[in-house]
């Protein structure tokens, strides 16, 4: 057999994994719980599968940026087909979409001779757009039990996604290491001209690799869909970068010709473990991404400087000039078996150890009483002042009540929300406060919490399944109606207006838009001439509004589905000097918007005090955790604030302890 | 300028590359540095050029001790190097003039905005000094290797060179281009410049140099004037013993035609017809651009080609390397690093790359069979390595070439096409490759040998075709086959 160096590309990731694991064992007792070990692997599965396909492509010195979009595309396809033709047809359709997408990428790269970075960047955009077009931005629900078992089922106490990851990992690892195709892949990636001269059809090798990447992305989509119980059109967004990171951490070289699947799987588990550990340790959500970036840098640094590090490591011995002069066996040469044992024990410890002792898990439940005074808040995003304020309100109230509140930021990502909630449940908090990224993800989380006997208080968006202890939220449809009413009033009941929608595929965007449409029906004199999405984002709204103004010079009003977009519209309108003629209405009542309303730059905002919402959530959560009776559902209504009402609204906010919104 | 080296040593880790070298070069003198690969020639020149610092020893210029902190420092002292690898020296996308002035720090043509007309005029002037006439606005990558070498020479002239180091400048040149270069080198010598010339081609070395310095194992093993020494003496000083017959030619040609080529046409090949018999080594000679290499590329399916070709009576489809390999044709590329080897992969994987089908069942590679096959062929070709699991990139040039040959031979070819089989390979490995050619011929393989190395072509071939302008100009056998006759037919009526 081949000699394996302790520092070989593949094993480096194993060492890093072991290092992080040991650090986490000392940092928190929760980490080593069998159920948590399973969480780590479960949350790694989706990225691991995408990364497995990406490994094939990267060994070819190419890259596939479209995998996240392919995942979304095939997930929507599968979910749609299942509801009509059953699970087998659905899976076949999803895999076919993945393979076809890969074929397109492969043909573009080989026959059309396009650099893969550009080709797949373009197809990423195309596939993502097609997905939104076919689904009209709506998630597609799946109820087929057999399919859901792919994500939610168990075998021998180990969740199905982990089995899928292991089986496909072994299969595709074997293909790389032992088959003729694997050989041809490495040769093509190392030196495509040489491979061609050796009689290899390099185009065929490349196309097949992109197809494998597409098929594995589709498979990852099955797991994600089955875990959530729904296919989200944007489910895969950003996963391509996580997958590439896993591949690189796993020791596969971007230059091609070097790498293997074991490293990639370990890389994916390492990324999941870092997420898990940071969640368990309650590290600030903002710093979590700093830590992840640092780990990726460290991995690549070690990769690029392994020679130097090795010399430092063996500082007692003279440096060696070239690999050729290194003795085959000698004092410094590791016994060939040792690294394998280390590798197997680390990975095996995680998988087998966790699986075998799952049975013991039930005994953990008794200790929950001591943690009654703790709560976890999983919030959909903290990149938006509205949700930051919700978090502040909840923290404020929790502090008043003497509750230890742990806040997790899901970054608008269903998978992240699901993973964070799953991790949080390990800690057995007194109550789980949940701001679902989507109703479907919220549903899956609620069911999990029900199983773990942790009560759930959801807010802002209703989970589609599971049992809630309480729900509290603003009425998004009514918010849209309020906005329409205000805009109608502002433009004097006549003329042309534009609507800026939120992030397509999110329920708030849908509901507010629905309400706005309903509201505009009652304002027959006003015509909505432009409807565009600006993703709830101020910068995008600036660009979108600029374009709308160009296309529709005569408009007199703009409605932004949130204040961020309304403020982006203000900036665009201002730069054209049209503030006097165009009235702008927003939604949410964030500080900047209130200031803009007061100064007259905006006409009104439908203020939904996030701080008050946060306080309310914490209050109800505390009551639930203490076993008190609470109202099952409370719908809060926003308050339309126009110029004269700003001061009054601000003094109300200060009264409840929100000193940040109105400066 | 007199450059004197005394007691230079240099080690890389445990590897002692130079073990105390003394050398002195006078103005207007051409000193040739010869030795096998790994003898320390390149390291020595890099030390003189300031790219490496010696571990001990002293460099003095005109009696004054100098320490160069880097190549810029050495350039400042008038030391210029033309390295073997063109890509290390030129920027292929930039035009000729920009390349000539790439290292120019004088700001002669303006510091921020370049006065292009002035720069191109000056470039043309320098190029005419080295005897070539090319458009100075062409990207350097579009020029032939020979022209590229002369562009480098022009660059050196611009820097008032006092010591010029040429590291295997003719490795990629044909004889005519080499002659052009030598003429320029002699001109520079006459102007009082000292020249260090490194080459594996002994006839050149003897023709050009005043003094020959032979290196072996990091030391100077022999030194003398060209008149005092003989080729045999130099070779024995290089290898450390007498080499009996450098070209151990055996004759195995039979009557059975294995390769029949009729009216082969491709880019650079105009209607070429020939036959090769079992056990025969057919040499093809010619200058660069004569189409000698293109014939092989066409037969192997690398270039678009037409013509009727058959192997053992069966027609050969000129479509892709896959078709050619399937029909029993093997091809040894002249550029083993660019299009031969996959350098990061193990020796065994490289050797079996073209014959994976034979060791694959249901798509799965039979590792045991592969190891046995590769171990056997590596032993047969004496590939020097710790293990066949080592990456090919860690081997020396000669051993890399043997790995590539092993790949060709594993396919049990009917036809073996070889182009420049000993380029950049040291003397020991050369001899080994020649004996492999003998063995292969003895087994009845029809061998086609394309080479710019005239002695090799003449000595190792049973018969030689000389090509010129894409056609066969002459066929030379036994008595008529001499280096002189090959050259005459290759260059005949060439006018420039």
Image (tube, rainbow, N blue to C red):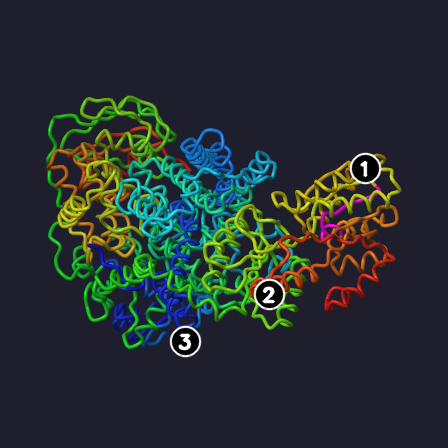
Residue B66's label in the rendered image is 3
Q: Mark 2 or mark 1, which has the lower sequence index?
A: 1
Where disc 2 sits, the SS reads helix
- Depth check: give the residue in front, A181 or B214: A181
How far from the left and from the top, in percent, is residue B145? 40, 46
Residue at the spot of label 2: A622
- Image depth: mark 3 or mark 2 in front: 2
Residues at marks 3 and 1, common chain? no
- Depth check: give the residue in front, A206 or A322: A206
Q: To which quarter of the image does residue A187 belong?
A: top left
Left or right: A324 as drawn, with respect to B115: left
Residue A398's label in the rendered image is none
- Depth check: give the residue in front, A413 or B102: A413
- Image depth: mark 2 or mark 1 in front: 2
Q: Alpha carbon of mark 3 to alpha carbon of mark 1: how far?
A: 92 Å
Q: To which quarter of the image does residue A406 belong?
A: bottom right
Dot 3 and dot 2 residues touching (CB under 8 Å): no
Residue at the spot of label 1: A522
Mark 3 neighbour density, 10 Å: few (under 14) some (14–19) many (20 or more): few
């Amino acid at each position: 057999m081949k000699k394996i160096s302790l520092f070989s590309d593949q094993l480096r990731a194993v060492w890093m994994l072991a290092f992080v694991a040991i650090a986490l064992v000392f940092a928190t007792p929760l980490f080593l719980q069998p159920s948590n070990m399973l969480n780590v692997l479960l949350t790694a599965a989706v990225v691991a599968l995408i990364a497995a396909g990406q490994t094939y492509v990267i060994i070819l010195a190419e890259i596939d940026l479209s995998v996240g979009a392919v995942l979304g595309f095939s997930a929507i396809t599968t979910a749609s087909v299942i509801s009509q033709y059953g699970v087998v047809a659905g899976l076949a359709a999803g895999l076919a979409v993945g393979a076809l997408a890969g074929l397109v990428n492969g043909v573009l790269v080989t026959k059309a001779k396009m650099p893969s970075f550009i080709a797949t960047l373009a197809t990423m955009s195309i596939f993502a757009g097609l997905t939104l077009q076919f689904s009209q931005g709506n998630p597609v629900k799946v109820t087929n039990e057999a399919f859901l078992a792919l994500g939610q089922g168990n075998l021998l106490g180990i969740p199905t996604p982990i089995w899928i990851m292991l089986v496909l990992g072994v299969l595709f690892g074997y293909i790389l290491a032992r088959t003729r195709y694997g050989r041809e892949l490495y040769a093509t990636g190392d030196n495509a001209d040489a491979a061609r001269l050796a009689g290899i059809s390099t185009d065929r090798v490349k196309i097949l690799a992109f197809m494998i990447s597409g098929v594995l992305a589709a498979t990852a989509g099955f797991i994600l869909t089955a875990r959530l119980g729904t296919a989200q059109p944007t489910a895969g967004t950003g996963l391509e970068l996580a997958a590439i990171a896993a591949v690189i951490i796993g020791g596969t070289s971007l230059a091609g010709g070097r790498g293997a699947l074991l490293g990639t799987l370990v890389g994916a588990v390492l990324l999941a473990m870092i997420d898990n550990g940071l969640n368990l340790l309650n590290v600030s959500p903002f710093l979590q991404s700093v830590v992840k970036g640092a780990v990726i840098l460290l991995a690549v640094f070690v990769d690029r400087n392994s020679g130097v590090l090795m010399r430092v490591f063996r500082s007692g011995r003279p440096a060696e000039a070239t690999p050729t002069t290194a003795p085959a066996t000698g004092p410094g040469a590791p016994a060939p078996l040792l690294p394998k044992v280390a590798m197997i024990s680390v990975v095996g410890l995680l998988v087998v150890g966790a699986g075998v002792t799952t049975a013991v898990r039930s005994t953990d439940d008794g200790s929950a009483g001591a943690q009654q005074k703790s709560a976890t808040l999983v919030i959909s995003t903290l990149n938006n002042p509205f949700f930051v304020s919700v978090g502040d309100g909840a923290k404020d109230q929790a502090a008043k009540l003497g509750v230890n509140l742990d806040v997790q930021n899901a970054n608008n990502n269903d998978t992240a929300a699901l993973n964070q909630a799953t991790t949080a449940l390990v800690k057995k908090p007194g109550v789980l406060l949940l701001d679902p990224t989507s109703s479907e993800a919220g549903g899956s989380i609620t069911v999990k919490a029900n199983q773990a006997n942790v009560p759930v208080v959801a807010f802002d968006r209703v989970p589609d399944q599971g049992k809630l202890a309480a729900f509290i939220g603003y009425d998004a449809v009514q918010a849209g109606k309020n906005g329409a009413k205000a805009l109608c009033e502002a433009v004097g009941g006549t003329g042309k207006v534009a609507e800026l929608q939120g992030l397509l595929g999110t329920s708030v965007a849908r509901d507010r838009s629905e309400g706005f449409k309903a509201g505009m029906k009652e304002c027959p004199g006003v015509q909505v001439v432009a409807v565009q999405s600006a993703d709830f984002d101020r910068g995008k709204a600036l660009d979108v509004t600029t374009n709308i103004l160009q296309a529709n010079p005569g408009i007199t009003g703009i409605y932004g589905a949130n204040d961020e977009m309304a403020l982006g519209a203000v900036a665009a309108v201002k730069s054209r000097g049209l503030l006097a003629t165009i009235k702008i209405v927003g939604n949410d009542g964030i500080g900047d918007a209130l200031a803009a309303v007061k100064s007259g730059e905006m006409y009104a905002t439908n203020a939904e005090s996030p701080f008050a919402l946060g306080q309310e959530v914490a209050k109800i959560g505390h009551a639930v955790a203490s076993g008190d009776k609470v109202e099952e559902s409370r719908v809060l209504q926003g308050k339309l604030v126009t110029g004269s009402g700003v001061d009054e609204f601000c003094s109300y906010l200060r009264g409840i302890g929100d000193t940040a919104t109105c400066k | 300028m007199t450059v004197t080296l005394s007691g230079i040593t240099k080690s890389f880790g445990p590897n002692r590359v130079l073990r105390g070298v003394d050398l002195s070069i006078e103005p207007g003198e051409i000193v040739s540095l010869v030795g096998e690969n790994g003898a320390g020639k390149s390291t020595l020149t890099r030390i003189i050029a300031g790219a490496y610092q010696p571990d001990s020893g002293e460099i003095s210029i005109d009696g004054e001790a100098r320490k160069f902190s880097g190549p810029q420092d050495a350039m400042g002292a008038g030391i210029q190097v033309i390295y073997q690898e063109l890509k290390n020296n030129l920027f292929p996308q930039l035009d000729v003039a920009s390349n000539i002035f790439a290292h120019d720090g004088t700001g002669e043509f303006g510091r921020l905005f370049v006065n292009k007309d002035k720069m191109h005029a000056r470039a043309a002037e320098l190029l005419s000094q080295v005897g070539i006439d090319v458009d100075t606005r062409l990207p350097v990558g579009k020029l032939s290797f020979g022209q590229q070498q002369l562009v480098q020479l022009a660059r050196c002239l611009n820097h008032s060179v006092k010591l010029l180091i040429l590291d295997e400048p003719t490795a990629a040149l044909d004889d005519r281009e080499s002659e052009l270069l030598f003429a320029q080198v002699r001109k520079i010598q006459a102007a009082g410049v000292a020249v260090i010339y490194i080459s594996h081609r002994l006839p050149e070395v003897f023709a050009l140099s005043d003094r020959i310095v032979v290196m072996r194992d990091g030391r100077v093993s022999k030194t003398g004037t060209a008149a005092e020494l003989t080729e045999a003496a130099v070779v024995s000083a290089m290898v450390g013993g007498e080499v009996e017959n450098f070209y151990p030619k055996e004759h195995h040609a039979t009557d059975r035609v294995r390769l029949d080529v009729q009216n082969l046409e491709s880019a650079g090949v105009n209607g070429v017809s020939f036959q090769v018999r079992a056990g025969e080594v057919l040499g093809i000679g010619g200058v660069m651009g004569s189409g000698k290499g293109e014939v092989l590329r066409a037969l192997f399916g690398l270039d678009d080609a037409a013509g009727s070709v058959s192997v053992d009576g069966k027609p050969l489809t000129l479509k892709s390397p896959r078709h050619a390999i399937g029909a029993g044709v093997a091809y040894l590329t002249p550029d083993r690093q660019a299009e031969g080897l996959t350098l990061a992969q193990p020796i065994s994987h490289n050797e079996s790359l073209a014959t994976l089908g034979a060791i694959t069942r249901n798509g799965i590679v039979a590792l045991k069979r592969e190891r046995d096959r590769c171990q056997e062929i590596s032993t047969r070709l004496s590939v020097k390595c710790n293990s066949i699991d080592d990456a090919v990139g860690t081997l020396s040039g000669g051993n890399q070439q043997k790995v590539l040959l092993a790949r060709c031979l594993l396919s049990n070819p009917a036809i073996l096409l070889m182009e420049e089989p000993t380029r950049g390979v040291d003397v020991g490995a050369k001899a080994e490759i020649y004996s492999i050619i003998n063995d292969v011929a003895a087994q009845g393989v029809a061998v086609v040998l394309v080479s710019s190395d005239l002695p090799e072509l003449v000595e190792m071939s049973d018969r030689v075709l000389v090509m010129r302008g894409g056609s066969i100009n002459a066929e030379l056998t036994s008595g008529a086959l001499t280096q002189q006759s090959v050259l005459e037919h290759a260059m005949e009526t060439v006018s420039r």
